[in-house]
Image (spheres, grey):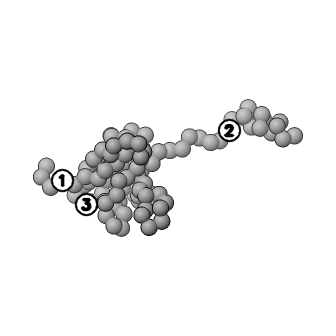
Amino acid sequence: MSGAKFIRVCEDDDESPIEVPVEEDDTVLLATLKSVFPRSTGLKYLAPESGCFRGVRLSEGKLFAPPDGWVHVYHCAFPKDNKRKGNGERDTFNSKFK
């Protein structure tokens, strides 16, 4: 596969990046990302000008390159744990403040 293009992706800062292939249309398939990082739901990167993480645009199963191209080390985005409390936990919380 001559001329193949890859982006560097890691789960967090403590790990070495893994190269993930870029498609001919300069997108990364979410299915490809999930084959390497099964729980991932997308990508984010640290924007140098703001120092904040930015999400990579996802549409129809494809991740689109940021405006400056695939030049960053990308971090997997994972779903947050369900923060909604069950009834028992809510009752305990409410009883503390009555």
- The span from disc 2 to disc 3 (Cα, nearest Å) is 43 Å
Residue at image point 83% right, 36% down: 95
Badge 2 crowding class, 10 Å Cα cut-off, few under 14, some 14 to 19, many 20 or more, is few
Q: Which mark is residue 25?
A: 3
Q: Secondary structure at mark 1?
A: loop
Picture coordinates of residue 42 (x, y %)? Answer: 42, 50
The numbered mark at residue 85 is 2
Mark 2 or 1, closer to the camera: 1
CA gap between label 1 and label 3 equals 12 Å
* SS at badge 3: loop
Q: Position of residue 68 (x, y in %)?
A: 33, 67
Quarter holding residue 70: bottom left
In the current view of this chain or complex, which residue is farthest to the front? Answer: 14
Number of numbered discs overlaid on the protein picture: 3
Mark 1, residue position: 4
Residue situated in front as seen by the camera: 62 or 54: 54
Tell me the kind of residue under disc 3.
Asp
Q: Position of residue 52 (x, y in %)?
A: 49, 60
Residue, x 43% and y 40% (percent of image)?
39
